[in-house]
Image: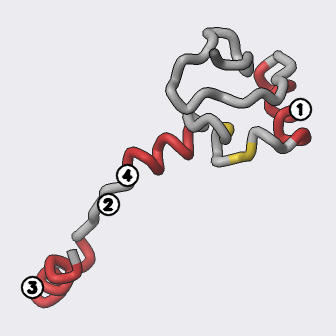
Amino acid sequence: MAALNNLAILLGFGDRLASIGAEGNSQGARDMGLLPDSLPGQLSVKDTAVRERLGKLWGLNPQLSPASPTGRCSTAAFKPCS
């Protein structure tokens, strides 16, 4: 990747080069709150104040419960996974 960046700079295209690393999808998942330990904006699900603020915004009372790393979760928000 460094070699590609250097070549683009040498050819005068350094300001037009953008790259998305191998972790691009993981970053999006973290930003959207799709990981079991995070809420949207990479906010911690363990933070009571964050859960209360989002609960008011979403119109529900999110409870802290661990999510399953295997993805077998209940369809109801913030319910324990099996």
What is the number of the mark on residue 52?
1
Which colouring convention does the figure follow? secondary structure
How far is mark 4 from mark 1, CA to CA? 29 Å
Q: Residue at x 86, y 25 (%)?
A: 56
How far is mark 4 from mark 2, CA to CA? 6 Å
The percent coordinates of residue 69 (x first, y second) are: 55, 32
Q: Residue at x 84, y 44 (%)?
A: 47
Disc 3 vs disc 2: which is toward the camera? 2
Q: Quadrant of the N terminus?
A: bottom left
Point out the tag, 4 or 1, that comes first from the N-terminus: 4
How far is mark 1 from mark 2, CA to CA? 34 Å
What is the number of the mark on residue 21?
2
Q: Are marks 4 and 3 in contact (CB under 8 Å)?
A: no
Outermost residue on the front side: it is: 82
Amino acid type, residue under disc 2 in the picture: Gly
Q: Are marks 4 and 2 in contact (CB under 8 Å)?
A: yes
How far is mark 3 from mark 1, CA to CA? 52 Å
Amino acid type, residue under disc 4 in the picture: Gly
Mark 4 = which residue? 24
Mark 3 = which residue? 11
